[in-house]
Image (spheres, rainbow, N blue to C red):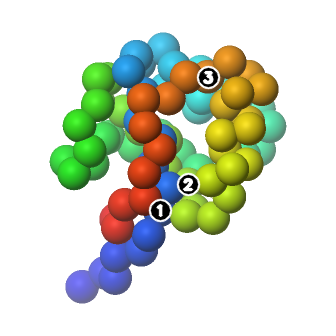
């Protein structure tokens, strides 16, 4: 059985914000990926950005700098 690891999961109210996040992160070689929203989180659009559990403040600053609005930022065992 695969061992669960702690990840940072950023959820969004709108799919457009999730897609914007993915596009910007790919262009800037930021680590992470779009995932279906884990069942333990309830949010608007059903998509989330998953990254390593470190650097929560870095992600907050990155999103603020680029005008990306998140619904929540949580740590989840996936």
SS class, disc 1 = strand
Q: Describe residue 2's horizontal placement relative to residue 5 as left or right.
A: left
Q: Which label belongs to residue 7?
A: 1
Label 3 belongs to which residue?
Answer: 68
Q: Is residue 15 above or below residue 55?
A: above
Q: Is residue 4 above or below residue 10?
A: below
- Residue under the image location 61 percent in, 22 percent down: 68
- x then y, percent, for residue 41: 26, 44
Neighbor class of circle 1 (other Cα within 10 Å; few <14, some 14-19, many 20+) is: some
Q: Are marks 1 and 2 in contact (CB under 8 Å)?
A: yes
> Who comes first in sequence, dot 1 or dot 2?
1
SS class, disc 3 = loop
Q: Describe residue 2's horizontal placement relative to residue 49 as left or right.
A: left
CA–CA distance in space, label 2 to label 3: 16 Å
Quadrant where the N terminus sits is bottom left
Say which of 58 and 5 sits in front: 58
Q: Describe residue 18's horizontal placement relative to residue 59 as left or right.
A: left
- x then y, percent, for residue 66: 74, 22
Say which of 59 and 2 sits in front: 59
Q: Which label belongs to residue 15?
A: none
> Who comes first in sequence, dot 1 or dot 3?
1
Label 2 belongs to which residue?
Answer: 51
CA–CA distance in space, label 1 to label 2: 6 Å
- x then y, percent, for residue 32: 59, 50
- Residue under the image location 35 percent in, 67 percent down: 77
Q: Are marks 2 and 3 in contact (CB under 8 Å)?
A: no
- Residue 10 is at least partly visible in this image: yes
């Amino acid at each position: 059985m695969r061992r669960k690891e702690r990840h940072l999961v950023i959820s969004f109210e709108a799919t457009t914000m999730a897609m914007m996040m993915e596009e910007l992160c790919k262009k800037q070689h930021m680590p992470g990926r779009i995932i279906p929203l884990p069942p333990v989180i309830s949010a608007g659009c059903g998509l989330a950005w998953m990254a390593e559990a470190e650097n929560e403040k870095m992600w907050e600053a990155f999103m603020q700098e680029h005008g990306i609005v998140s619904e929540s930022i949580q740590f989840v065992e996936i």
